[in-house]
Image (cartoon, coloured by chain):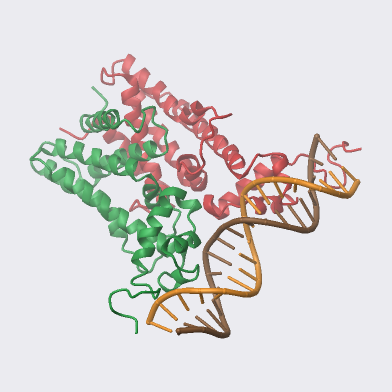
Chain colours: A green, B red, C orange, D brown
DNA sequence: ACCTGAACACCGTTCAAGT
DNA sequence: ACCTGAACACCGTTCAAGT
């Protein structure tokens, strides 16, 4: 008789969530390449074959982490943009800061999300989730175009420019290729704002 | 007696270059995570222990590939910018196209270069090489600032904006997150040009 | 229904031993 | 000086067998 809220011995309670949680920890300390299903199983206190009852394979478990990451990032962007009553320009800047923040604070998840290492299985993947960041930007841009502060161009085009630039900054920061000390949050924030302002106001005179 | 231009049997000729060459092929078909030293050895026709005479470990071999990638990319950018006698704006656009082209045509190398998977060993790595792309852009920007067509801002700031945006575009393309069919070169080129133009001319009216 | 243990074909790395 | 083969501690995945 198994129930009674996670009984004395292992039949487990609910593995699956324990696996996802453990996978997050393993990913954090080993990185995407060093990530091992056997270690996740050990962390969760089950045999190395047990995870296969809950995930088709290693890639499926990583996908779960990836999806969660996309949702977190989307939320972070929207929260930043809706924070205070800004004009579209300021919203765009705050969204950029949030984007880069997420990346720098979750480098391994970010690599997993955008590295293309995990093959996006055609099956049960909703690719629109991965594009949530872009869509949040699109909303801001649309507002700016409508109220006339942005150029009269297709919003998708402008949103791509904004996405592209904050994504590049995030990726360079994660890769450690920015001259800035990435751990100094103040300096990084100012860098992000400077880049975003330049994107908004352009490079030419 | 070993010499006489790579004699009959294996003492090898010059392994090391054979390893680098084989490693490129293995990386191409297996990706950074699937990349295995034992397979490289097999491809080169030697025992799985032989590579250790020439590279400290697996990471060192990958580093060699990474360095080569940075040099290739830098060259591609400079070639594109110097191609025809452009003004700085056009140079920037052509450099962007070259950057994204390199990424899309060498996705695994690009991931290796910018993924941060290989720990940059403090030792014999010249990190400036990795930044060659940025410096090529800096040259173009400097020219634009001096002749007065770009804004009167620190060239490093403007170059970071340009780098950031083309890098982001390249990374999104490699990750397969652009709505565009990445194999349609024409469409991708136009997308790159559109983004670069927007960066140059800004988003606001 | 959920988990285990053994098994298979792979890894990276080291080290004595061969030429 | 350069390479091999065996050995060790790891992998992912499968499958019969246990509760």
The quarter of the displayed image where residue A128 is located? bottom left
Q: Residue at x 40, y 73 (%)?
A: A10
Q: Quadrant of residue A56?
A: bottom left
Asked whether, in this view, residue B6 is left or right of residue A113, the answer is right
Q: Residue at x 32, y 60 (%)?
A: A127
- The location of residue B106, given as percent across then percent down, is 51, 45
For residue A100, above or below residue A64 = above
Tell which of A136 and A84 is nearer to you. A84
Where residue A25 appears, as percent x and y from the top left, is: 39, 53
Q: Left or right? Give the position of A201 relative to B189.
A: left
Q: Nearer the viewer, residue B57 or A149?
A: B57
Image spot of residue A134 (x, y percent): 25, 49
Among all residues in the image, which is located at the extreme front? A8
Q: Is residue B65 left or right of residue A104?
A: right
Q: Identify whether A149 is placed above or below D12.
A: above
Residue A144 found in image quarter: top left
Given residues A113 and B180, the one toward you in this image is A113
| Residue A40 placement, left or right of B26 | left
| Residue drawn at x 19%, y 38% as measured from the top left | A94
Could you tell me which quadrant the N terminus of chain B lies in? top right
Is residue A138 visible in this depiction of the protein?
no
- Whether residue B102 appears in this view of the structure is yes
């Amino acid at each position: 008789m198994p129930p009674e809220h996670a009984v004395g011995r292992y039949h487990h309670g609910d593995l699956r969530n324990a696996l996802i949680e453990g996978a997050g920890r393993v990913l954090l300390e080993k990185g995407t390449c060093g990530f091992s299903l056997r270690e996740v199983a050990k962390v969760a206190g089950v045999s190395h074959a047990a995870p296969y009852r809950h995930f088709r394979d290693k890639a499926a478990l990583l996908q779960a982490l990836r999806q969660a990451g996309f949702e977190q990032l989307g939320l972070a962007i929207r929260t930043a943009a809706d924070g205070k009553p800004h004009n579209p320009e300021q919203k765009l800047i705050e969204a950029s800061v949030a984007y880069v923040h997420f990346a720098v604070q979750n480098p391994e998840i970010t690599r997993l999300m955008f590295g293309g290492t995990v093959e996006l299985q055609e099956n049960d993947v909703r690719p629109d989730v991965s594009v949530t960041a872009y869509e949040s930007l699109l909303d801001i841009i649309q507002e700016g175009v409508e109220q006339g502060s942005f150029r009269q161009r297709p919003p998708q085009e402008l949103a791509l420019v904004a996405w592209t630039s904050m994504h590049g900054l995030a990726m360079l920061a994660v890769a450690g290729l920015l001259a800035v000390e990435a751990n100094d949050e103040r300096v990084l924030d100012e860098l992000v704002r400077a880049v975003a302002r330049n994107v908004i106001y352009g490079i030419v005179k």
